[in-house]
């Protein structure tokens, strides 16, 4: 069995978006002779994912994460390039592919809204042709890992978002798919529910060897679960490598912004870069591993009278900025 | 095929259980639906209290056509009304969820919903059909009933085909509502004897939006009315043909599915 599960080459997807001209006459013209604008959601992404990997897929809103996942699931056809999942084209052979994957989309459920959770599971068992023994074993496992028992007989519409996500997660792993895609599964969940999701994903990846692709814009989703990270920005893969390397390098960066009372002499401190300094404002960035935050704060307040001071931890946005802009200092 | 029949049964069961979560809703909606449909049929009776015939048809013949039209529409509405929601699924991206399951998405749409508020139409239609059929001697033996059953299924299939085709345009048109609505409104014509309308409408309802086969034409076959019986006997073929065509169109649309942003 080849160890490569997903192979994407120059994967590109454009969308045609109808332009709606203003006013009544414009609307009429738009109807008679619609104009389209092309939006490039994914612009030539290439990557490979091996069996058993857990890969974090990060990017800001609109970066192209969901589009990538839809292409990998076979929901959409690529405009250009190609992708194979377990050797087949997921769009051309969508039904075949569908039996071997699972897709979780945050805040959207795939369960039957008005039915108790167990009814959805029984239906899904038939849809995915899960043998009864395997079904029972999995349901028992999920009762353990996700505390399904407490919601098993509750109609889905009465579940909280966190409970519903637990049910959805279990449902997606019910047929033992070798590949599972998760599109922002923790969005909108409270801290405890997020932790439950992360813990479960880690566990199922470790014990079952299920390959995971986890799209998120919350870096904390990665820590536990994903040793490898792909970062997408404006439809292009900006980073493909270890999570440690990425967060170790950029995740330790701290940014300090000071509002100044008046003009101050140019700020300097070894290991600290000045991003911007003018009459009213000073912005610096540094790595907290090489320079203590307290030392920087002290130096800033000493060099000039400060009206206000804020400290910003590295987040996805700052990392993207750094990667995208290059090391511009 | 067997797998799909079993799954269809399981989906129906799930749909029924879902409906029964809202028993009171269900009761109220259907009582009002029942009343509305009774009023509609009474309307036919009132017209006949003034005139002796319409378009050459007696009261019971018109009632038969009207009731057959109702039953065809009710069966579609109860079982397959979600062919009407396809436009919404396309515009809102709900189709995504169906596309990642190893089951034909149109099957999932048509099996996935049972309507809650049209049981009155089915009941009134069936009663009307029985009353008129008895009077006319058209439901005397099992064979006739079976034939009517086949016509009803074909008629419901025609409804599905029309709505499937109209809604498939949502793959290209952002605002396909107008076509869905047109398809929805036109079915009003299907309950009346087609020959009372002008050539234009008759042509439309026969060859373009073939609601004529969901009531009038099959009734003509049962009546043994030589002018239209041939078309009437073709009802099942028309139903299958229309659905096959609409299905091809749907597949074509599906290939250009874009989904929605985020
Ligand atoms: N169906 C669509 N029609 C038009 N534009 C779309 C569609 N899907 C995505 N887009 C656009 O493509 C870009 C990438 O979107 P998406 O893949 O959803 O990003 P992400 O999931 O990373 O937030 C965005 O600019 C978005 O507006
Ligand atoms: Mg997204």
Image (tube, rainbow, N blue to C red):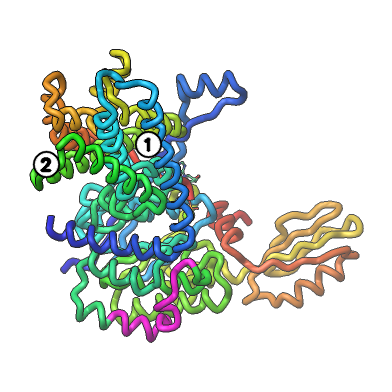
Residue at the spot 25% in from the left edge and 36% down from the top edge: B158
Residue at the spot 16% in from the left edge and 69% down from the top edge: A1
Above or below — where is A95 with respect to B251? below
Evaluate whether label 1 is on the same chain as label 2. Answer: yes
Tell me where residue A126 appears, x and y as whole percent.
Answer: 23, 67
Q: Is residue A314 something one can see in this rendering?
A: yes
Tell me where residue B188 appears, x and y as whole percent.
Answer: 37, 30
Secondary structure character of the magenta stretch overall: helix
Query: Start and end of the magenta stretch?
Result: A138-157
Residue assigned mark 2: B144
Q: Quadrant of residue B154?
A: top left
Residue assigned mark 1: B41
Residue A156 colored in magenta in the image: yes
Q: Chain of mark 1?
A: B
Q: Nearer the viewer, residue B100 or B111?
A: B111
Q: Nearer the viewer, residue A117 or B48?
A: B48
Horizontally, is A185 left or right of A45 in the view? right
Q: Nearer the viewer, residue A7 or B224?
A: B224
Residue B153 colored in magenta in the image: no
CA neighbours of label 2 inside 10 A, class few (<14), some (14 to 19), many (20+)? some
Tell me where residue A218 appears, x and y as whole percent.
Answer: 54, 66
User: Real-space Cα distance between discs 1 and 2?
Assistant: 23 Å
Above or below — where is B205 with respect to B124? above
Q: Please tell me whether mark 2 sits on a helix, a strand or a loop.
A: helix
Single out the residue that lies furthest toward the top.
B199
Q: Is residue A57 something one can see in this rendering?
A: no
Earlier-in-chain disc, 1 versus 2? 1
Count of numbered badges drawn on the protein: 2
CA neighbours of label 1 inside 10 A, class few (<14), some (14 to 19), many (20+)? some
Tell me where residue B155 appears, x and y as whole percent.
Answer: 23, 37
């Amino acid at each position: 069995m080849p160890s490569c599960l997903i192979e994407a080459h120059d994967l590109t997807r454009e969308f045609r978006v109808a332009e709606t001209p203003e006013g009544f006459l414009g609307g009429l013209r738009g109807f008679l002779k619609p104009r389209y604008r092309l939006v490039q959601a994914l612009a030539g992404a290439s990557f490979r994912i091996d069996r058993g990997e857990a890969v974090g897929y990060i990017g800001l809103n609109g970066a192209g994460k969901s589009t990538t996942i839809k292409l990998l699931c076979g929901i959409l056809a690529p405009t250009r390039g190609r992708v194979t999942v377990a050797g087949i084209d997921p769009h051309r052979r969508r039904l075949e592919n569908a039996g071997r994957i699972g897709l979780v989309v945050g805040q959207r459920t795939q369960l039957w809204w008005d039915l108790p959770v167990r009814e959805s599971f029984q239906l899904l068992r038939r849809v995915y042709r899960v043998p009864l023994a395997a079904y029972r074993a999995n349901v028992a496992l999920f009762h353990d890992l996700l505390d399904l028992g407490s919601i098993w007989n509750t109609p889905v519409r009465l579940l909280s978002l966190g409970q519903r996500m637990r049910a959805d997660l279990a449902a997606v792993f019910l047929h033992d798919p070798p590949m599972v895609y998760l599109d922002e599964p923790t969005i909108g969940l409270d801290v405890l529910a997020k932790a439950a999701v992360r813990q479960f994903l880690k566990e199922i990846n470790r014990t079952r060897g299920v390959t995971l692709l986890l799209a998120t814009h919350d870096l904390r989703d990665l820590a536990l679960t994903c040793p490898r990270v792909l970062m997408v920005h404006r439809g292009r893969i900006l980073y493909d490598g270890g999570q440690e390397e990425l967060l170790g390098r950029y995740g330790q960066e701290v940014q300090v912004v000071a509002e100044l009372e008046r003009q101050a002499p140019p700020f300097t401190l070894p290991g600290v870069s000045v991003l911007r300094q003018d009459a009213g404002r000073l912005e610096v960035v540094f790595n907290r591993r090489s320079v203590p935050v307290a030392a920087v704060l002290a130096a800033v307040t000493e060099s000039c009278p400060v009206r206000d001071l804020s400290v910003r931890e590295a987040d996805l946005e700052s990392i993207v900025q750094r990667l995208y802009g290059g090391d511009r200092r | 095929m067997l797998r799909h029949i079993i799954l269809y049964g399981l989906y129906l069961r799930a749909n029924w259980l879902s409906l029964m979560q809202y028993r009171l809703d269900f009761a109220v909606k259907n009582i009002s639906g029942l009343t509305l449909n009774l009023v509609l049929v009474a309307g036919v009776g009132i017209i006949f209290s003034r005139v002796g015939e319409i378009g050459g048809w007696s009261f019971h013949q018109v009632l038969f056509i009207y009731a057959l039209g109702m039953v065809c529409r009710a069966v579609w509405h109860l079982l397959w009304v979600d062919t009407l929601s396809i436009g919404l699924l396309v515009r809102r991206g709900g189709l995504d969820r169906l596309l990642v399951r190893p089951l034909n998405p149109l099957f999932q749409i048509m099996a996935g919903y049972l309507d809650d508020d049209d049981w009155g139409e089915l009941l009134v239609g069936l009663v009307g059909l029985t009353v008129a059929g008895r009077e006319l001697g058209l439901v005397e033996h099992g064979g006739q009933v079976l034939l009517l059953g086949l016509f009803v299924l074909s008629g419901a299939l025609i409804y599905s085909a029309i709505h499937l085709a109209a809604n498939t345009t949502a793959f290209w048109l952002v605002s396909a509502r107008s076509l869905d609505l047109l398809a929805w409104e036109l079915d009003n014509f299907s309950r009346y004897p087609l020959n009372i309308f002008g050539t234009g409408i008759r042509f439309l309802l026969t060859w373009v939006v073939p609601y004529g086969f969901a009531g009038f034409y099959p009734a003509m076959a049962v009546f043994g009315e030589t002018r239209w019986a041939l078309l009437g006997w073709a009802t099942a073929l028309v139903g299958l043909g229309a659905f096959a065509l609409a299905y091809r169109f749907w597949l074509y649309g599906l290939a250009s599915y874009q989904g929605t942003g985020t």
